[in-house]
Image: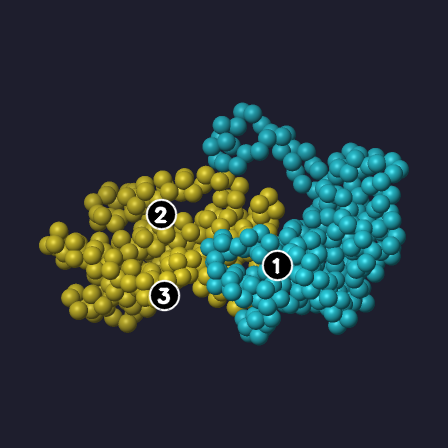
Amino acid sequence: MHVVDLQGISKKFRIPSARRDTLREHVFGLFNPRRFEDLWVLRDIRFTVRKGETFGIMGRNGCGKSTLLKIIAGIYRPDGGSLDVRAPLTPILGLGLGWNQELTARDNLLLTGTAMGMSLKELGEQFDDIIAFAELERFVDLQLKFYSSGMSARLAYSIAFRAVREILLLDEVFAVGDGAFTQRCQDRYTELHKSGHTLLLVSHNPETIAKHCQRGVLIDGGRVAFEGDSEGVAKAYERLVGGGEPSDGKPRTEGEAAG
Amino acid sequence: MRDFIWTLIRTDFKARYHGAVGGFVWALAKPLVMFLVLHQVFSFLFRDRAYLYNLLLGILLWSFFAEGSTTGLESLYRKSFLLTKTSFPRWIVVMTSIANSLLTLLVYALSILVVLMFSHGRPSIVCLLLFVLYIFLYVVIVFGFSLGASVLFLKYRDLNQVWDVMLQAGFFLAPIMYPLSILPEKYHFWLYLWPVTPIIQFSRAVLIDHAPPTLKAHLMLFGLTFTVFGIGALLFRRYAQPAMETL
């Protein structure tokens, strides 16, 4: 049974020739109209993730991975195709969660936790576990603005790993913290997999994908370039980066994609 | 979702009062002290009691509009740290942004009711219920405005400056410092389109003059509320998602 199903997902961004963010700029720009270019970041992406599977998404920087993740997480809306996510999903995007710098770690944790759909009761029960996992017991009532970037990233991963519901979506996991923390994350990852959670892992490190995933896809130029078992994905990625015809790695525009 | 709404309100509140111990006392004390100061100063300045109460009520209702619409306008932008990382119904952020201003308004409203009870005359139950209705419609108006404005603010980042200027003009456009009757009758209809005006005038009618407005006037207020909320909600529905993707 599948839990995440992507059927021909496409996404475009309208890129203006000049950026205008204020009313003033719009008024002064009335006689100088902008041109818009449609940039297709994702084109006809199809794959299916089964329940309990560890699934990797690979690709180089700028291939559309992050956009794809945001679509799966429900933050961006696709411009074409359909997405079916059948279980509650905990996303960790771009090294961290949204933090409010003025609030303490405790409040930030409660805010993001409830925003992801957990109840205060669930969070209360797991609170100590989450903080212990991040080794931040001494700093729990410290405002986030006093945290180092490593500390706040640790907090984010702790929430993800301790408070995960059905599906866990991870962007560049195991890239944070010292050796001990990385090891703890990996142990927890294995544990989650054994207990039947579905894990989606995004990385541009072939070893991570080969080691931690069963299957996966390789995204290149906004399309699925390879789909199969994770060793195959890792090899395809190395071929893509290493030898052969190097693709420019840039997302394609409408004309190219059609042609 | 209920837990999320509650946590948002609580943390907004905390950020505003810097998490001070007794932050709640502070939140209540601030509007209360403000009310007492205004009351004392204006009592000293104006011998005319009816003018004094009209002025107080006008200022208190106005301050909710000014504060609520400003925080509402900035709400999506200020919560972009959540919007770019998690998915949840976006209007919740706009709705909860008004909570703090609403709390202040309720403290003000209770204070002025107490003062009116003791030194002016007790409004009837019907009048009190009508006042509660006006407060409700007022909140709907500010919420509707905030829905539309918060999305536009993501696109036009100087909209808060524009709104600030409009609020300054709006203060004098509404009959707060002066009675509406000093302006020519033919302009009244247009003046009532500025939503603060009917809310202030109707509240004065029920709380101070004890003479509720006509049914027709009420229907027009409902129409105005519905229009403001409708436009805001439509803008939000249509543009919220694409605007947030540019954050």
Q: Residue at x 51, y 62 (%)?
A: A139
Q: How far from the left and from the top, in percent, is residue A138?
A: 51, 65
> Quick check: can you spot residue B33?
yes
Q: Is residue B58 above or below residue B110?
A: above
Q: Does residue A159 appear left or right of residue B13 in this picture?
A: right
Q: Does residue B18 appear left or right of residue A153 in this picture?
A: left
Q: CA distance from mark 2 to mark 3?
A: 40 Å
Going by the numbered disc 2, the residue's amino acid type is Trp
Residue pointed to by mark 1: A154
User: Color of chain B here?
Assistant: yellow
Q: Is residue A205 above or below residue B159?
A: below
Q: CA distance from mark 1 to mark 3?
A: 29 Å
Q: Residue at x 15, y 66 (%)?
A: B119
> Quick check: can you spot residue A7?
no
Q: Does residue B124 appear left or right of residue B91 in this picture?
A: left
Of all chains, the one bearing label 1 is: A
Q: Does residue B65 appear left or right of residue A77 in this picture?
A: left
Q: Is residue B118 above or below residue B165?
A: below
Residue pointed to by mark 3: B21
Q: Nearer the viewer, mark 1 or mark 2?
A: 1
Going by the numbered disc 1, the residue's amino acid type is Arg
